[in-house]
Image: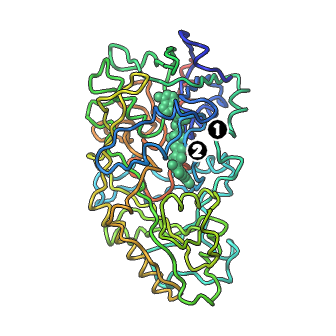
Amino acid sequence: MLLNGVANHGKTFEAEVCVVGAGAAGLTLAMDLASRGVSVLLLESGGVKFQWESHELLDVERMGDTPERLVTGTRERFFGGTTNHWGGLCRPFDAFEFEEKPWVPNSGWPISRDDLQPYYEAAARLLNLPEVDRPYDLAALGVAGHPTLLGEFVDNLEPRVAHRAPTGRLRMGQWRLEDIKKNPLITCLLNTTVAEIHSATSGDHIEYLEGRTLQKGSLQFRARDYVLCTGAIENARLLLASNAVHPAGLGNEHDLVGRFYMDHAANGLGRILPLDPAAGPSAEEVLATRIPVGWANTPRARREYKLQGFYALCINDNLKQPLAHERAMLSLTGAPQGGHSESPSRLRKALLVNWEQAPNPHSRILLSSSRDVLGVPKPAMDWNVTEQDINSAAKSAELLSLAVAQGGRARLQIGDLRKPPYTVGGGHQMGGTRMSVDPKHGVTDMNGRVHALENLFVGGSSLFPTGGWQHPTLTIVALALRQAEFLGARHARTGS
Ligand SMILES: Cc1cc2nc3c(=O)[nH]c(=O)nc-3n(C[C@H](O)[C@H](O)[C@H](O)COP(=O)(O)OP(=O)(O)OC[C@H]3O[C@@H](n4cnc5c(N)ncnc54)[C@H](O)[C@@H]3O)c2cc1C
Protein backbone atom coordinates (compact mmCIF):
# COMPACT_ATOMS: atom_id res chain seq x y z
CA MET A 1 0.00 0.00 0.00
CA LEU A 2 1.30 3.47 -0.89
CA LEU A 3 0.19 6.40 1.30
CA ASN A 4 1.11 10.05 1.54
CA GLY A 5 2.30 11.24 4.95
CA VAL A 6 0.68 14.62 4.33
CA ALA A 7 -2.79 13.05 4.24
CA ASN A 8 -2.12 11.24 7.51
CA HIS A 9 -0.93 13.95 9.90
CA GLY A 10 -1.34 13.04 13.56
CA LYS A 11 -1.77 9.31 12.95
CA THR A 12 0.18 6.38 14.42
CA PHE A 13 1.13 3.40 12.24
CA GLU A 14 2.29 0.00 13.43
CA ALA A 15 4.00 -3.02 11.87
CA GLU A 16 6.50 -5.69 12.83
CA VAL A 17 9.46 -3.94 11.18
CA CYS A 18 9.83 -0.28 10.30
CA VAL A 19 12.29 0.46 7.46
CA VAL A 20 13.40 4.05 6.94
CA GLY A 21 14.41 5.01 3.38
CA ALA A 22 13.25 3.51 0.06
CA GLY A 23 16.57 3.25 -1.79
CA ALA A 24 18.64 0.20 -2.75
CA ALA A 25 18.88 -1.08 0.83
CA GLY A 26 15.39 -0.18 2.09
CA LEU A 27 13.46 -1.46 -0.94
CA THR A 28 15.39 -4.74 -0.95
CA LEU A 29 14.88 -5.25 2.77
CA ALA A 30 11.17 -4.33 2.76
CA MET A 31 10.32 -6.60 -0.17
CA ASP A 32 12.29 -9.55 1.21
CA LEU A 33 10.81 -9.19 4.70
CA ALA A 34 7.29 -9.15 3.23
CA SER A 35 8.09 -12.29 1.23
CA ARG A 36 8.85 -13.92 4.61
CA GLY A 37 5.44 -12.92 6.00
CA VAL A 38 6.71 -9.97 8.07
CA SER A 39 4.63 -6.76 8.01
CA VAL A 40 6.62 -3.65 7.12
CA LEU A 41 6.27 0.10 7.41
CA LEU A 42 8.45 1.72 4.75
CA LEU A 43 9.04 5.44 5.30
CA GLU A 44 10.33 7.62 2.49
CA SER A 45 11.25 11.28 2.77
CA GLY A 46 10.48 12.13 -0.86
CA GLY A 47 7.65 11.41 -3.26
CA VAL A 48 7.58 9.16 -6.31
CA LYS A 49 9.28 11.85 -8.37
CA PHE A 50 12.13 14.30 -7.72
CA GLN A 51 11.16 17.53 -5.96
CA TRP A 52 13.50 20.29 -4.80
CA GLU A 53 11.80 20.72 -1.43
CA SER A 54 12.71 17.22 -0.24
CA HIS A 55 16.06 17.24 -2.08
CA GLU A 56 17.15 20.25 -0.03
CA LEU A 57 16.83 18.16 3.12
CA LEU A 58 20.10 16.55 1.98
CA ASP A 59 22.02 19.76 2.56
CA VAL A 60 25.38 19.21 4.23
CA GLU A 61 27.74 21.64 5.94
CA ARG A 62 31.11 21.05 4.31
CA MET A 63 34.38 20.70 6.19
CA GLY A 64 37.76 19.09 5.44
CA ASP A 65 38.11 17.79 1.87
CA THR A 66 34.37 17.63 1.26
CA PRO A 67 33.64 18.80 -2.30
CA GLU A 68 30.62 20.91 -3.17
CA ARG A 69 29.19 18.36 -5.58
CA LEU A 70 28.70 16.04 -2.67
CA VAL A 71 25.85 18.22 -1.52
CA THR A 72 23.85 18.56 -4.71
CA GLY A 73 24.91 15.93 -7.19
CA THR A 74 25.50 12.64 -5.46
CA ARG A 75 22.38 11.57 -3.61
CA GLU A 76 18.67 11.54 -4.35
CA ARG A 77 15.87 12.07 -1.88
CA PHE A 78 12.83 10.37 -3.40
CA PHE A 79 11.41 6.88 -3.90
CA GLY A 80 14.25 4.70 -5.24
CA GLY A 81 16.89 6.89 -3.55
CA THR A 82 20.21 7.32 -5.31
CA THR A 83 19.44 4.42 -7.65
CA ASN A 84 17.46 7.09 -9.53
CA HIS A 85 20.79 8.11 -11.03
CA TRP A 86 23.38 5.45 -10.28
CA GLY A 87 25.44 3.84 -13.05
CA GLY A 88 24.42 0.24 -12.26
CA LEU A 89 27.96 -1.21 -12.12
CA CYS A 90 28.04 -4.28 -9.92
CA ARG A 91 30.80 -6.50 -8.65
CA PRO A 92 31.08 -8.34 -5.32
CA PHE A 93 33.92 -7.65 -2.92
CA ASP A 94 36.66 -10.29 -3.23
CA ALA A 95 37.49 -12.37 -0.13
CA PHE A 96 40.62 -10.25 0.29
CA GLU A 97 38.57 -7.09 0.99
CA PHE A 98 37.06 -8.61 4.15
CA GLU A 99 40.45 -9.48 5.67
CA GLU A 100 42.34 -7.47 8.22
CA LYS A 101 45.43 -5.93 6.62
CA PRO A 102 48.27 -4.99 8.95
CA TRP A 103 49.25 -2.02 6.74
CA VAL A 104 45.70 -0.60 6.77
CA PRO A 105 44.81 0.46 10.32
CA ASN A 106 41.25 -0.39 11.41
CA SER A 107 40.71 -2.76 8.47
CA GLY A 108 38.89 -6.11 8.64
CA TRP A 109 35.21 -7.03 8.55
CA PRO A 110 33.42 -9.13 11.20
CA ILE A 111 32.04 -11.26 8.35
CA SER A 112 33.83 -12.99 5.47
CA ARG A 113 33.15 -13.34 1.77
CA ASP A 114 31.94 -16.90 2.51
CA ASP A 115 29.34 -15.49 4.92
CA LEU A 116 28.08 -13.18 2.20
CA GLN A 117 28.38 -15.57 -0.75
CA PRO A 118 24.77 -16.94 -0.73
CA TYR A 119 23.44 -13.39 -0.48
CA TYR A 120 25.66 -12.18 -3.32
CA GLU A 121 24.20 -14.98 -5.42
CA ALA A 122 20.66 -14.02 -4.38
CA ALA A 123 21.42 -10.34 -5.08
CA ALA A 124 22.69 -11.24 -8.57
CA ARG A 125 19.50 -13.21 -9.26
CA LEU A 126 17.38 -10.34 -7.96
CA LEU A 127 19.14 -7.78 -10.14
CA ASN A 128 19.05 -10.10 -13.13
CA LEU A 129 22.83 -10.29 -13.38
CA PRO A 130 24.30 -13.34 -15.10
CA GLU A 131 26.58 -14.60 -12.32
CA VAL A 132 28.31 -13.22 -9.26
CA ASP A 133 31.98 -13.23 -10.24
CA ARG A 134 32.34 -12.80 -13.95
CA PRO A 135 35.64 -14.38 -14.99
CA TYR A 136 38.09 -12.48 -17.14
CA ASP A 137 38.20 -15.07 -19.86
CA LEU A 138 38.86 -13.61 -23.30
CA ALA A 139 37.14 -16.51 -25.08
CA ALA A 140 34.08 -16.40 -22.83
CA LEU A 141 33.92 -12.64 -23.27
CA GLY A 142 34.11 -13.04 -27.05
CA VAL A 143 37.40 -11.15 -27.59
CA ALA A 144 39.85 -14.06 -27.89
CA GLY A 145 41.25 -12.64 -31.14
CA HIS A 146 42.36 -9.39 -29.53
CA PRO A 147 45.57 -8.89 -27.50
CA THR A 148 45.33 -7.43 -24.01
CA LEU A 149 47.07 -4.20 -23.07
CA LEU A 150 48.92 -5.46 -20.01
CA GLY A 151 52.32 -7.11 -20.27
CA GLU A 152 52.39 -10.89 -20.15
CA PHE A 153 54.16 -11.24 -16.78
CA VAL A 154 52.44 -8.44 -14.97
CA ASP A 155 51.29 -9.47 -11.49
CA ASN A 156 50.61 -6.10 -9.90
CA LEU A 157 47.38 -5.48 -11.79
CA GLU A 158 44.66 -7.81 -12.95
CA PRO A 159 41.88 -7.23 -15.46
CA ARG A 160 38.41 -7.18 -13.96
CA VAL A 161 35.01 -6.90 -15.58
CA ALA A 162 31.85 -5.80 -13.82
CA HIS A 163 28.17 -6.32 -14.53
CA ARG A 164 25.82 -3.54 -15.39
CA ALA A 165 22.34 -3.83 -13.89
CA PRO A 166 19.88 -4.24 -16.78
CA THR A 167 17.43 -1.46 -17.62
CA GLY A 168 14.47 -3.07 -15.86
CA ARG A 169 16.38 -3.24 -12.56
CA LEU A 170 18.41 -0.04 -12.79
CA ARG A 171 15.94 2.49 -11.41
CA MET A 172 14.92 0.54 -8.35
CA GLY A 173 12.05 2.87 -7.47
CA GLN A 174 10.40 2.45 -10.86
CA TRP A 175 11.02 -1.29 -10.77
CA ARG A 176 9.54 -1.75 -7.25
CA LEU A 177 6.71 0.80 -7.23
CA GLU A 178 3.86 -1.47 -8.39
CA ASP A 179 5.09 -4.36 -6.18
CA ILE A 180 5.06 -2.11 -3.14
CA LYS A 181 1.61 -0.72 -3.98
CA LYS A 182 0.15 -4.21 -4.31
CA ASN A 183 1.86 -5.86 -1.35
CA PRO A 184 -0.63 -6.30 1.54
CA LEU A 185 2.20 -6.60 4.08
CA ILE A 186 3.91 -3.30 3.15
CA THR A 187 2.62 0.14 4.06
CA CYS A 188 4.82 2.76 2.42
CA LEU A 189 4.46 6.38 3.49
CA LEU A 190 5.84 8.94 1.05
CA ASN A 191 6.78 12.54 1.84
CA THR A 192 7.47 11.41 5.39
CA THR A 193 10.87 12.25 6.83
CA VAL A 194 11.96 10.50 9.99
CA ALA A 195 13.16 13.37 12.16
CA GLU A 196 13.82 11.63 15.45
CA ILE A 197 14.25 8.14 16.84
CA HIS A 198 12.75 7.96 20.33
CA SER A 199 14.36 5.49 22.69
CA ALA A 200 12.83 4.31 25.97
CA THR A 201 14.07 6.17 29.06
CA SER A 202 15.98 2.98 29.96
CA GLY A 203 17.95 3.76 26.79
CA ASP A 204 18.18 0.15 25.64
CA HIS A 205 15.46 0.00 23.00
CA ILE A 206 13.48 2.17 20.60
CA GLU A 207 9.86 2.97 21.35
CA TYR A 208 8.83 4.86 18.23
CA LEU A 209 9.94 7.02 15.31
CA GLU A 210 8.71 10.50 14.69
CA GLY A 211 8.00 11.44 11.09
CA ARG A 212 7.57 14.99 9.87
CA THR A 213 6.25 16.41 6.62
CA LEU A 214 7.16 19.60 4.79
CA GLN A 215 3.59 20.71 5.46
CA LYS A 216 4.45 20.85 9.17
CA GLY A 217 2.59 17.74 10.28
CA SER A 218 3.90 14.84 12.31
CA LEU A 219 3.23 11.09 12.46
CA GLN A 220 4.33 8.24 14.73
CA PHE A 221 5.62 4.81 13.78
CA ARG A 222 5.80 1.85 16.15
CA ALA A 223 7.37 -1.51 15.41
CA ARG A 224 9.19 -4.41 17.04
CA ASP A 225 12.37 -3.62 15.05
CA TYR A 226 13.57 -0.51 13.22
CA VAL A 227 16.08 -0.36 10.36
CA LEU A 228 17.71 2.84 9.09
CA CYS A 229 18.40 2.67 5.34
CA THR A 230 18.80 6.37 4.61
CA GLY A 231 22.33 6.31 3.12
CA ALA A 232 25.64 6.60 4.99
CA ILE A 233 25.47 10.31 5.79
CA GLU A 234 21.83 10.37 6.87
CA ASN A 235 22.10 7.16 8.93
CA ALA A 236 24.81 8.77 11.08
CA ARG A 237 22.93 12.08 11.18
CA LEU A 238 19.74 10.45 12.47
CA LEU A 239 21.59 8.56 15.21
CA LEU A 240 23.46 11.67 16.31
CA ALA A 241 20.39 13.92 16.19
CA SER A 242 18.27 11.52 18.28
CA ASN A 243 19.85 12.61 21.54
CA ALA A 244 16.96 13.11 23.97
CA VAL A 245 17.93 10.13 26.17
CA HIS A 246 21.55 9.57 25.15
CA PRO A 247 23.04 13.09 24.93
CA ALA A 248 25.80 11.97 22.52
CA GLY A 249 23.26 10.34 20.21
CA LEU A 250 22.05 6.76 19.82
CA GLY A 251 24.67 4.02 19.67
CA ASN A 252 27.39 6.56 20.36
CA GLU A 253 28.67 5.34 23.75
CA HIS A 254 32.17 5.04 22.30
CA ASP A 255 32.06 8.19 20.17
CA LEU A 256 32.09 6.15 16.94
CA VAL A 257 28.88 7.20 15.18
CA GLY A 258 29.81 9.14 12.04
CA ARG A 259 33.49 8.19 12.22
CA PHE A 260 35.45 6.18 9.64
CA TYR A 261 33.51 7.91 6.87
CA MET A 262 34.91 6.89 3.46
CA ASP A 263 34.34 7.43 -0.20
CA HIS A 264 35.89 6.27 -3.43
CA ALA A 265 37.76 9.43 -4.26
CA ALA A 266 36.99 8.64 -7.87
CA ASN A 267 37.91 10.79 -10.79
CA GLY A 268 39.22 10.71 -14.30
CA LEU A 269 42.73 9.29 -14.24
CA GLY A 270 43.71 9.95 -17.84
CA ARG A 271 43.73 8.19 -21.18
CA ILE A 272 45.00 5.14 -22.98
CA LEU A 273 47.08 6.08 -26.01
CA PRO A 274 47.74 3.12 -28.34
CA LEU A 275 51.29 3.29 -29.75
CA ASP A 276 50.31 2.07 -33.19
CA PRO A 277 46.97 3.54 -34.26
CA ALA A 278 46.97 1.26 -37.29
CA ALA A 279 47.07 -1.91 -35.14
CA GLY A 280 43.77 -3.56 -34.30
CA PRO A 281 42.01 -2.65 -31.06
CA SER A 282 42.97 -4.39 -27.82
CA ALA A 283 40.65 -6.75 -25.94
CA GLU A 284 40.04 -4.04 -23.33
CA GLU A 285 39.09 -1.45 -25.96
CA VAL A 286 36.62 -3.82 -27.60
CA LEU A 287 35.17 -4.89 -24.26
CA ALA A 288 34.80 -1.33 -23.02
CA THR A 289 32.26 -0.67 -25.77
CA ARG A 290 29.89 -3.21 -24.24
CA ILE A 291 30.76 -4.07 -20.61
CA PRO A 292 32.56 -2.29 -17.79
CA VAL A 293 36.19 -3.44 -17.83
CA GLY A 294 39.24 -2.26 -15.95
CA TRP A 295 42.28 -3.20 -13.90
CA ALA A 296 42.48 -3.67 -10.13
CA ASN A 297 45.66 -3.85 -8.11
CA THR A 298 46.28 -7.45 -6.99
CA PRO A 299 46.42 -8.68 -3.37
CA ARG A 300 50.07 -9.49 -4.09
CA ALA A 301 50.84 -5.88 -5.02
CA ARG A 302 48.76 -4.60 -2.13
CA ARG A 303 50.79 -6.70 0.31
CA GLU A 304 54.15 -5.87 -1.23
CA TYR A 305 53.65 -2.12 -1.63
CA LYS A 306 51.23 -1.73 1.32
CA LEU A 307 48.46 -0.43 -0.90
CA GLN A 308 44.74 0.08 -0.58
CA GLY A 309 42.27 -0.98 -3.29
CA PHE A 310 42.49 0.63 -6.72
CA TYR A 311 40.43 0.10 -9.88
CA ALA A 312 40.98 1.89 -13.18
CA LEU A 313 37.98 1.52 -15.43
CA CYS A 314 38.16 1.96 -19.22
CA ILE A 315 35.42 4.29 -20.30
CA ASN A 316 33.86 3.97 -23.71
CA ASP A 317 34.49 7.60 -24.38
CA ASN A 318 36.70 9.22 -27.00
CA LEU A 319 37.67 12.47 -25.41
CA LYS A 320 39.46 15.35 -27.09
CA GLN A 321 39.51 17.60 -24.06
CA PRO A 322 41.04 16.84 -20.66
CA LEU A 323 38.75 14.44 -18.85
CA ALA A 324 36.19 16.01 -16.54
CA HIS A 325 34.72 13.88 -13.81
CA GLU A 326 31.17 14.69 -14.83
CA ARG A 327 31.82 13.56 -18.40
CA ALA A 328 33.19 10.28 -17.19
CA MET A 329 30.11 9.80 -15.07
CA LEU A 330 27.87 10.56 -18.04
CA SER A 331 29.72 7.95 -20.01
CA LEU A 332 29.32 5.43 -17.22
CA THR A 333 25.61 5.97 -17.00
CA GLY A 334 25.28 5.68 -20.77
CA ALA A 335 24.07 9.26 -21.23
CA PRO A 336 24.78 11.02 -24.54
CA GLN A 337 28.24 12.53 -24.79
CA GLY A 338 27.31 15.76 -26.55
CA GLY A 339 30.23 17.64 -28.07
CA HIS A 340 32.69 14.77 -27.91
CA SER A 341 31.24 12.64 -30.66
CA GLU A 342 33.33 14.37 -33.33
CA SER A 343 36.34 12.28 -32.34
CA PRO A 344 35.53 8.67 -33.13
CA SER A 345 39.23 7.82 -32.93
CA ARG A 346 40.02 5.04 -30.53
CA LEU A 347 43.10 6.94 -29.41
CA ARG A 348 41.61 8.50 -26.37
CA LYS A 349 39.93 5.86 -24.25
CA ALA A 350 39.40 7.47 -20.90
CA LEU A 351 40.17 5.92 -17.53
CA LEU A 352 38.12 6.47 -14.42
CA VAL A 353 39.48 5.40 -11.04
CA ASN A 354 37.92 4.18 -7.82
CA TRP A 355 40.44 4.16 -5.05
CA GLU A 356 40.05 3.05 -1.52
CA GLN A 357 40.59 5.16 1.56
CA ALA A 358 41.99 3.63 4.73
CA PRO A 359 39.35 3.79 7.49
CA ASN A 360 40.12 6.95 9.43
CA PRO A 361 38.42 7.98 12.69
CA HIS A 362 39.04 11.65 11.87
CA SER A 363 37.09 11.44 8.63
CA ARG A 364 33.60 11.86 10.00
CA ILE A 365 30.04 13.09 9.98
CA LEU A 366 29.02 15.39 12.79
CA LEU A 367 26.03 17.57 13.49
CA SER A 368 26.03 21.15 12.27
CA SER A 369 24.72 23.94 14.46
CA SER A 370 22.19 24.82 11.71
CA ARG A 371 18.93 22.96 11.15
CA ASP A 372 16.87 22.03 8.11
CA VAL A 373 13.29 23.22 7.58
CA LEU A 374 12.00 20.25 9.60
CA GLY A 375 14.06 21.36 12.60
CA VAL A 376 16.60 18.52 12.35
CA PRO A 377 20.29 19.46 12.76
CA LYS A 378 22.04 19.29 9.41
CA PRO A 379 24.97 16.92 9.01
CA ALA A 380 28.43 18.46 8.94
CA MET A 381 30.87 16.45 6.90
CA ASP A 382 34.54 16.44 7.74
CA TRP A 383 35.66 14.11 4.96
CA ASN A 384 39.42 13.64 5.01
CA VAL A 385 41.70 12.22 2.37
CA THR A 386 45.08 11.39 3.87
CA GLU A 387 48.59 11.29 2.43
CA GLN A 388 48.45 7.51 2.84
CA ASP A 389 45.31 7.36 0.65
CA ILE A 390 46.75 9.54 -2.08
CA ASN A 391 50.17 7.91 -2.08
CA SER A 392 48.55 4.49 -2.32
CA ALA A 393 46.44 5.52 -5.32
CA ALA A 394 49.35 7.27 -7.01
CA LYS A 395 51.58 4.20 -6.57
CA SER A 396 48.88 1.95 -8.03
CA ALA A 397 48.47 4.30 -11.00
CA GLU A 398 52.23 4.18 -11.52
CA LEU A 399 52.18 0.35 -11.44
CA LEU A 400 49.36 0.37 -13.98
CA SER A 401 51.21 2.76 -16.22
CA LEU A 402 54.31 0.52 -16.10
CA ALA A 403 52.24 -2.59 -16.77
CA VAL A 404 50.65 -1.05 -19.87
CA ALA A 405 54.06 0.17 -21.08
CA GLN A 406 55.41 -3.35 -20.54
CA GLY A 407 52.63 -4.69 -22.78
CA GLY A 408 54.12 -2.62 -25.59
CA ARG A 409 50.84 -1.70 -27.30
CA ALA A 410 49.95 1.55 -25.58
CA ARG A 411 50.97 3.99 -22.96
CA LEU A 412 48.93 5.77 -20.36
CA GLN A 413 48.67 9.49 -20.18
CA ILE A 414 47.66 9.97 -16.57
CA GLY A 415 47.14 12.89 -14.26
CA ASP A 416 48.80 13.44 -10.90
CA LEU A 417 46.56 11.92 -8.28
CA ARG A 418 48.29 14.03 -5.64
CA LYS A 419 46.63 17.15 -7.03
CA PRO A 420 43.16 18.21 -5.81
CA PRO A 421 41.11 17.77 -9.00
CA TYR A 422 41.93 14.09 -8.80
CA THR A 423 40.48 13.60 -5.36
CA VAL A 424 36.83 14.35 -6.03
CA GLY A 425 34.57 11.88 -4.27
CA GLY A 426 30.95 11.95 -3.27
CA GLY A 427 29.43 9.06 -5.20
CA HIS A 428 29.98 6.14 -2.86
CA GLN A 429 29.38 7.21 0.71
CA MET A 430 30.52 4.51 3.16
CA GLY A 431 31.21 4.01 6.88
CA GLY A 432 29.89 6.00 9.82
CA THR A 433 28.12 3.05 11.51
CA ARG A 434 30.75 0.38 10.84
CA MET A 435 30.17 -3.24 11.83
CA SER A 436 32.36 -4.77 14.52
CA VAL A 437 32.45 -7.69 16.92
CA ASP A 438 33.53 -5.46 19.80
CA PRO A 439 31.29 -2.43 20.57
CA LYS A 440 34.47 -0.46 21.28
CA HIS A 441 35.44 -0.74 17.61
CA GLY A 442 32.19 -0.14 15.78
CA VAL A 443 28.59 0.99 16.03
CA THR A 444 26.78 -2.12 14.76
CA ASP A 445 27.19 -5.87 15.13
CA MET A 446 27.56 -8.36 12.30
CA ASN A 447 23.80 -8.25 11.62
CA GLY A 448 23.74 -4.47 11.46
CA ARG A 449 22.15 -4.09 14.91
CA VAL A 450 23.29 -1.04 16.87
CA HIS A 451 25.34 -2.66 19.65
CA ALA A 452 23.70 -0.89 22.56
CA LEU A 453 20.09 -1.03 21.33
CA GLU A 454 18.03 -4.16 21.30
CA ASN A 455 15.81 -3.31 18.32
CA LEU A 456 17.59 -0.70 16.19
CA PHE A 457 19.36 -1.81 12.99
CA VAL A 458 21.22 -0.07 10.20
CA GLY A 459 21.35 -1.04 6.52
CA GLY A 460 23.46 0.18 3.59
CA SER A 461 27.08 1.10 3.08
CA SER A 462 27.42 2.91 6.42
CA LEU A 463 27.99 -0.64 7.72
CA PHE A 464 31.17 -1.10 5.65
CA PRO A 465 34.36 -1.26 7.79
CA THR A 466 36.42 -0.79 4.60
CA GLY A 467 35.37 0.35 1.15
CA GLY A 468 37.36 -1.86 -1.25
CA TRP A 469 37.63 -0.75 -4.86
CA GLN A 470 34.38 -2.33 -5.97
CA HIS A 471 31.22 -0.31 -6.47
CA PRO A 472 29.17 -0.62 -3.28
CA THR A 473 25.57 -1.33 -4.25
CA LEU A 474 25.70 -5.07 -4.97
CA THR A 475 27.18 -5.49 -1.48
CA ILE A 476 24.46 -3.20 -0.05
CA VAL A 477 21.79 -5.40 -1.64
CA ALA A 478 23.50 -8.61 -0.45
CA LEU A 479 23.71 -7.25 3.11
CA ALA A 480 20.02 -6.25 2.97
CA LEU A 481 19.05 -9.79 1.93
CA ARG A 482 21.16 -11.21 4.74
CA GLN A 483 19.55 -8.83 7.23
CA ALA A 484 16.07 -9.73 5.95
CA GLU A 485 16.80 -13.40 6.63
CA PHE A 486 18.03 -12.55 10.12
CA LEU A 487 15.04 -10.35 10.94
CA GLY A 488 12.60 -12.81 9.36
CA ALA A 489 13.93 -15.59 11.62
CA ARG A 490 13.83 -13.28 14.64
CA HIS A 491 10.16 -12.51 14.02
CA ALA A 492 9.30 -16.15 13.38
CA ARG A 493 10.95 -16.97 16.76
CA THR A 494 9.19 -14.29 18.77
CA GLY A 495 5.92 -14.87 16.91
CA SER A 496 5.38 -11.13 16.92
C1 LIG B 1 26.62 9.40 -10.06
C2 LIG B 1 26.56 8.15 -9.26
C3 LIG B 1 26.78 6.94 -9.90
C4 LIG B 1 26.76 5.77 -9.14
N1 LIG B 1 27.01 4.60 -9.79
C5 LIG B 1 27.09 3.46 -9.08
C6 LIG B 1 27.42 2.25 -9.73
O1 LIG B 1 27.63 2.21 -10.94
N2 LIG B 1 27.49 1.13 -8.99
C7 LIG B 1 27.27 1.14 -7.63
O2 LIG B 1 27.38 0.09 -7.00
N3 LIG B 1 26.92 2.28 -6.99
C8 LIG B 1 26.82 3.43 -7.67
N4 LIG B 1 26.48 4.59 -7.04
C9 LIG B 1 26.14 4.54 -5.59
C10 LIG B 1 24.70 4.04 -5.35
O3 LIG B 1 23.79 4.93 -5.92
C11 LIG B 1 24.47 3.93 -3.84
O4 LIG B 1 25.45 3.02 -3.32
C12 LIG B 1 23.11 3.36 -3.44
O5 LIG B 1 22.06 4.04 -4.04
C13 LIG B 1 22.97 3.46 -1.92
O6 LIG B 1 21.79 2.80 -1.53
P1 LIG B 1 21.08 3.17 -0.14
O7 LIG B 1 19.80 2.44 -0.10
O8 LIG B 1 22.02 2.98 0.98
O9 LIG B 1 20.83 4.76 -0.23
P2 LIG B 1 19.91 5.54 -1.24
O10 LIG B 1 19.75 4.78 -2.50
O11 LIG B 1 20.42 6.91 -1.35
O12 LIG B 1 18.48 5.57 -0.53
C14 LIG B 1 18.26 6.28 0.68
C15 LIG B 1 16.78 6.64 0.76
O13 LIG B 1 16.49 7.12 2.07
C16 LIG B 1 15.62 8.24 1.98
N5 LIG B 1 15.81 9.03 3.20
C17 LIG B 1 16.92 9.71 3.57
N6 LIG B 1 16.72 10.26 4.78
C18 LIG B 1 15.47 9.92 5.19
C19 LIG B 1 14.72 10.18 6.36
N7 LIG B 1 15.21 10.89 7.40
N8 LIG B 1 13.45 9.69 6.44
C20 LIG B 1 12.93 8.96 5.42
N9 LIG B 1 13.62 8.68 4.29
C21 LIG B 1 14.88 9.15 4.18
C22 LIG B 1 16.05 8.93 0.70
O14 LIG B 1 15.05 9.77 0.19
C23 LIG B 1 16.36 7.74 -0.21
O15 LIG B 1 15.23 7.32 -0.93
C24 LIG B 1 26.49 5.79 -7.74
C25 LIG B 1 26.25 7.01 -7.11
C26 LIG B 1 26.31 8.18 -7.85
C27 LIG B 1 26.13 9.46 -7.14
Q: Position of residue 402 (x, y in %)?
A: 41, 82
Q: Which residue is mark 2?
A: 83
Q: Residue at x 31, y 36 (%)?
A: 366
Q: Position of residue 129 (x, y in %)?
A: 67, 54
Vertical side of 327 occupied by 229: above or below: above
Q: CA distance from mark 1 to mark 2?
A: 8 Å
Dot 1 or dot 2, earlier in sequence: 2
Q: Residue at x 35, y 20 (%)?
A: 204
User: What's the residue type where badge 2 is placed?
Assistant: Thr
Q: Which residue is mark 1?
A: 173
- Nearest the viewer among 52 and 189 is 52
Badge 1: residue crowd in 10 Å (few <14, some 14–19, many ≥20): many
Ligand 1 within 8 Å of the CB at mark 1: yes
The secondary element bearing badge 1 is classed as helix
> Which residue of the protein is positioned furthest toward the top in this rendering?
10
Vertical side of 410 occupied by 262: above or below: above
Q: Is residue 299 left or right of residue 326?
A: left
Q: Quadrant of residue 283?
A: bottom right
Are the two marked residues, 1 and 2, in contact with CB atoms closer than 8 angstroms?
Answer: yes
Residue 452 visible in the current orientation: no
Q: Quadrant location of the N terminus?
A: top right
